[in-house]
Amino acid sequence: MKLSSKARLTRRDLTRLIGGAAIALPALELFGHDVRAQAAGKAAKFAVFCYTPDGVNQKAFWPTGGTTDFTLSSILQPFEAYRDKLLILGPEMANGSPKNGSGLTYSAATPQHQAAVTLSARIGNLPYVDPQTNAVNKIDGPSIDQVIAKAVVGDSLLSSVNFGIHPIGGDTPSDFNYKDDGSPIKRVTTADDAWNLVYGKPVAQAMPSDMSAAHKQSAVTDFLHARFASLRPQVSTYDQQVLDQHLAALRVYEDRLAKRSAGGGDMGCVTPTRKDVPSDATAVRTGADTEQLAPFYMDIISSAFACNLTKVASVTFGYPGGGDAGGLRMPWLNFTDPMHFVSHHGGGADKLSKYQQMSTWIAKQIAYLMQNLAAAKDTDGVPLLDKTVIYWFNRHGDGDSHSNFALPNVLLGGAGGYLSMGRYLQLPATSPTKVLISIANAMGVDVPTFGKDAFTATAGLSALTA
């Protein structure tokens, strides 16, 4: 193959020239992806998206009091230690209840349980297919987490990690991570798969089995340095710069891997304990696995951030819909009713109590993640929580009525100082797409427009910024 002195060296050209070693690289996407926009001033470094379906017990969710002197509700009580890192996106209230149509609101025709609107701001006309296990719920564009991940991946091993706790079931579409072409991204659903994704061997398996991961990566990098050196006379000055940047990123990764192999470093990069999460058929059927699986995912996310293995993560807690059998079960709370069943409470005290308990337990898992991030330090000594934005969001307001307003969505973390935290906002009817754009902006990513049709927005929500 002859290279033009003016033609840009493509990744395909590079792979053909350097051989199979390029394939052995740890998911490096340094060629052809968008460059992260540099935010002026403050910006977060990490983002986590936590999705809960089927709404909440509204009376047990919203705080009381004013913008800064609020008292947390029973569901939000697990965040009391981090109230200065909370931004509660509430509706306007009247006599302790949300005003109809206020708060974060999907104003278009009710798309029911379709999850595409949550992070993609697109209805997508997703079909109801039973069972959803093998459904392909493709839409027409990416989800915001993937827009952000593509822009900020840098030298991280993985662009994003996407975990699900019993995320698929029934006849209701439940995907919410989508690629640029609208294809759904499969979520990791077991402890073993999560561990292997983040801590599995990232380099060529053909190398000696007794060779450490750091030494394997060093061998690959040394080979590429020699191979690239032979290519330099054949390519343009621009392509030489591309090669140099690629090699520099490889060395950064190699240094990071060496720190992880040593069990720490300045970033507190420590591999978490590999917990024994029940995976037998009974535990999976009854939901008994969930009690251990959720905190295990949070351990992996905080460790992956500390080790710069990724900068973007998501966790889904169950799936929407599914009739009386739908969603998560939490037998350790001393009842076995699934979330979708209790969300259709009809005003009954027993179901409302269970509804509240289930949401509170999920809040505790997110608070546990915040605790982990607060304990871990970045290279500059700043706690990772101060550099992280977490979005806990829901498709519905009240599950019983499938309401599209008063969505119980909360921003958490320090967000790099970009968002003004420690507040309880009571908003008029507001597009959730504006929040998605604000999260991207908080991560230093410029998103001029996002969403489709009635869900389109062209700017973030100014009330959120510092």
Image (cartoon, rainbow, N blue to C red):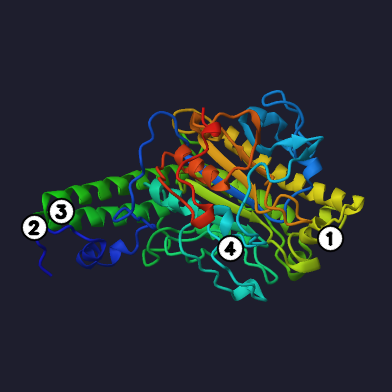
The 10 Å Cα crowd at callout 3, few under 14, some 14 to 19, many 20 or more, is: some
Q: Is residue 46 left or right of residue 393?
A: left
Amino acid type indicated by mark 4: Asp
Residue on which disc 4 sits: 175
The mark lying in front, picked from 2 and 4, is 4
From mark 2 to mark 1, how far is it between C-alphas? 67 Å
From mark 2 to mark 4, how far is it between C-alphas? 45 Å
Q: Is residue 168 left or right of residue 303?
A: right
Residue on which disc 2 sits: 5
The mark lying in front, picked from 4 and 3, is 4
Residue at x 44% of width, y 48% of height? 148
Q: Is residue 13 above or below residue 150?
A: below
User: Which comes before the other along the chain, label 4 or label 1?
Assistant: 4
Q: Nearer the viewer, residue 171 or 154?
A: 171
From mark 4 to mark 3, how far is it between C-alphas? 44 Å
Q: Nearer the viewer, residue 88 or 377?
A: 88
Residue 229 circle label: 3
Residue at x 73% of width, y 45% of height? 100
